[in-house]
Amino acid sequence: MRGRTGGGSNRRGAGIGTLGDPMRDDDPAGGFYSKGILGGPIDLDSNARKVVYPKVEAVPGLAVEQRGSGLRGVVVSLAKGIVTLRDPNGRDRQVRLRDGGFMVDRAQVTLVPPTAKGTAAVGRTASGSVAVTGAAARVARASRILVEGLHDAELVEKVWGDDLRIEGVVVEMLDGADHLGELVRTFGPRPGRRLGVLLDHLVDHSKESRLAQEIDHPDVLITGHPYVDVWAAVKPSVVGLRAWPDVPKGENWKDGVCRRIGVSDPRAFWKQLLGAVGSYADLEPPLVGAVEQLIDFVTEPS
C-alpha cells in the first residue's frame, strides 16, 4: 500500500515521520516519501523482488483465459511471442504473450513455447477435449440424446463420439420431429434420466420451434441450429466451396445443393462431406454450441 503525501511536511530536514520515525537530513529520497506509510523502503526500493509466475507450456488444446480481457479459448499455436486461441465459437484470436498474462486452472501463469515432449503428451479428441488414452467406454447412462436423422447422428458420432463413450451417453434417432411430444412421454424423463434433443431448423415460426415450445419439462432440454439441414452446419470450405448454394423454399435442400454443384449422388456426397470433417472447427458455431449444451445437460449430476 503506498504512503499518503497529504497532511505532512515535504521539506527536507529534521521532523517526525508518519509513525514517529525521525527524518534524516541525509535521507537521499526526501523524508517519508521513501519510507511509505509503514516507514519502510517500499516505493523506491530498487531491490524489491519481481513477481515470478509459474510457467506453463502452451500445448495445443490447453484451455486458458487471458487476464484483463477475459478471453477464453484453447491454444491452437504459439509463434514469435503470439499465441493463437480458438474461442468457444470456433473463431481464432491472436494474443501477445506477457508475464502472468493468462489463467490456467484458476492460477495466474506465464505461457511459454511447448517442448516437443510436451506437445506429444497432450492428445485431443475431435471435439477439442483431452483424449483419455486406453479408457473403456462407460456403461450407458439412463439419459439419452435424440437427433433428427441418420446424418445428424453420424456427424455427432464423428466429432463427439469419443466424449460420448467416455460419458456413457447414447445417441438415438428421432426420424423426424413430428412425434416429439409422444417420444418424450414414452421416454419418461426424470432426475437421473434426462433427455436432450437436437433439432434442425430451430428458428422462430418454424415447425421445429413450435414443437419444441410444446415441451416443458425440467429434465428435457431441446437445442438446435438454424440450418434447414445438418449438411449446412458443416462449413462448405471443407469440400472446397465458398458457400452453400441457395435453394428455393419448397425444393429438397440436399437434392438442390447437389444439382447446383454438379453432384449426381447425394449419398456419395454426404460420405465425402462427412469424411472431410476433422474436428469441431469444421462445423458452424451454432451446431457446436447446441451439442455441447446437450452433453453437459445429460451428464450433469442429479
Image (cartoon, grey):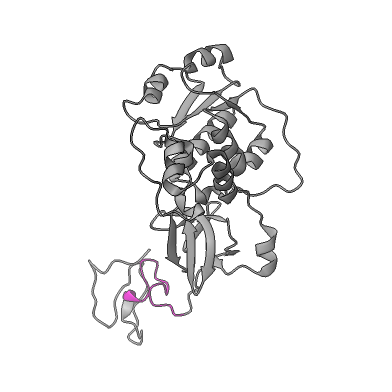
| Front in this rendered view, residue 56 or 192 | 192
Q: Quadrant of residue 193?
A: top right
Quadrant in the picture for the C terminus: top right
Asked if the magenta segment contains residue 114, the reply would be no
Quadrant in the picture for the N terminus: bottom left
* Residue 40: percent from left, percent from top: 42, 72
Q: Quadrant of residue 46?
A: bottom left
Q: In the image, is 101 to the left or to the right of 129?
A: left
Q: Is residue 93 visible?
A: yes
| Front in this rendered view, residue 65 or 198 | 198
| Front in this rendered view, residue 183 or 20 | 183
Residue 80 vertical placement versus 295 (above, below): below
Mark count: 0
* Residue 233: percent from left, percent from top: 46, 42
Residue sitting at x 24%, y 70%? 8
Magenta highlight range: 32-46
Of helix, strand and loop, which mostly describes the magenta segment?
loop
Residue sitting at x 67%, y 64%? 118
Residue 194 vertical placement versus 26 (above, below): above
Asked if the magenta segment contains residue 38, the reply would be yes
Q: Is residue 89 visible?
A: no
Residue sitting at x 54%, y 29%? 149
* Residue 287: percent from left, percent from top: 47, 40
Q: In the image, is 9 to the left or to the right of 40?
A: left
* Residue 286: percent from left, percent from top: 43, 41
